[in-house]
Amino acid sequence: MINPDLLRQELQEKISLVSSLEELNQLKASVLGRKGQLTQYLRSLGELPLEQRKILGAQLNSLKVELESFFLARERELEEARIRESLEKGRVDVTLPGIRPPLGRRHPLLQVWEEIEDAFLSLGFDIYEGPEVEWEYYNFGALNIPPDHPARDMWDTFYITDKMLLRTHTSPDQIRCMEEQRPPIKAIMPGLVYRHEAVDATHMDVFVQIEGLVVDKDTTFADLKGTLELFVSLIFGPGRKTMFVPSYFPFTEPSAELLILWDDEKGHNAAGGKWLEVLGCGQVHPQVLRNVGLDPQVYSGFAFGLGVERIAMLKYNIPEIRLFMENDLRFLEQFG
Ligand code: FA5
């Protein structure tokens, strides 16, 4: 004999123990579904005598309604729990430390390049730029280096055609600048230069030069020295040891080179020298002035061409120039 009260108790307990919506749906189907327990009971009522059928039928029908509401209530509970759980999982803990995206930074060479430009701008120089692919005339001829002159051997050149080449220095920009502007001229000319050269600890085949040119009526070698000494103190601070040594360039007379002493702690570079040559310089040769239509009786000037990598090497005590081109992050990340 079916006992509706016991059945209610039993099912109520089962419903409360179910822990997921899937299980709940299975249980519901097994009780109220087409072949479910209660559905079967209701179907079998017809086999009972009329009196019994009436009583039990009413009880089972109200149990059915009750059970439906139990199932619905439990379904809501489980649904709420599910939502709470997923909110809990997806919660953002704003107190956790953030993850920093890796930040790029400027290449050390570019930093030094800009520092050098700033130093000269503060001394009243303008910036002028010329092409990297240059006519042989500007790179050599106009600079007082005629064809077949042995001085052309000073620069192993990448030729593009007979007359066109990759500039071996920034000095051709002196000519371009003087052709375009009349004195007084006070300009620097930065850029890449190219040489078919054996690479070693202090030599690259592509590197950065910054040319300087001052042309006016009464410039002297003392102005050149004073300007460069001021420049060195702006970049390295006061007291850095420097040395001017006589040199030769076909486009300056007299000519010199500026050497800077390595940091005292290391005292030398990878090539073994205590001094590193950073630039060539001199007073503009009268023939160069004539080549651009300036009268050397009226005008004089001085010029210099410095190597940016060399300045960076001395500034950061890096004895190996190739490090600047290797793109090794362990090296590059040291420069803020
Ligand atoms: C010249 O290139 C001349 N045009 C400089 C000049 C300009 C003289 C104006 C007079 C008047 P030099 O070849 O020495 O000169 O190069 C100048 C500087 O560039 C050197 O002092 C050095 O700092 C740098 N340099 C030269 N060759 C290399 C190289 N292979 N790798 C890196 N830096 C270099």
Image (spheres, rainbow, N blue to C red):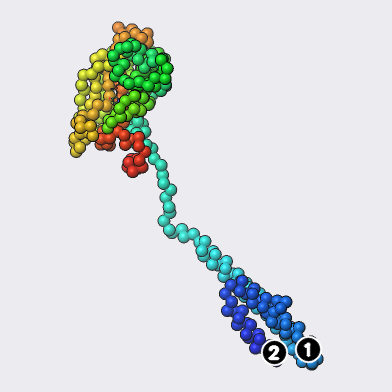
Badge number at residue 178 = none
Mark 2 crowdedness (10 Å alpha carbons): few <14, some 14-19, many ≥20: few
C-alpha span from label 1 to label 2: 13 Å
Location of residue 243 (image quadrant): top left
Left or right? Give the position of 46 relative to 103: right
Picture quarter with ligand 1: top left
Q: Which residue is mark 1?
A: 47
Left or right? Give the position of 104 relative to 51: left
Left or right? Give the position of 227 relative to 43: left
Identify the residue at the far right of this view. 50
Instruction: Tell me the residue at 54%/67% (across/down).
Output: 85
Q: Label 2 sits on what residue type? A: Ile
- Viewer-nearest of discs 1 and 2: 1
Position in image of residue 30 (x %, y %): 67, 78
User: Is label 1's Cβ within 8 Å of ligand 1?
Assistant: no
Q: Which residue is mark 2?
A: 2
Position in image of residue 276 (x %, y %): 23, 29
Quadrant where the N terminus sits is: bottom right
Position in image of residue 310 (x %, y %): 28, 30
Location of residue 291 (image quadrant): top left
Instruction: Tell me the residue at 41%/15% (across/down).
Output: 162
Q: Label 1 sits on what residue type? A: Glu
Q: Secondary structure at mark 2?
A: loop
Could you tell which of marks 1 and 2 lies nearer the N-terminus?
Answer: 2
Front-most of residues 100 and 127: 100
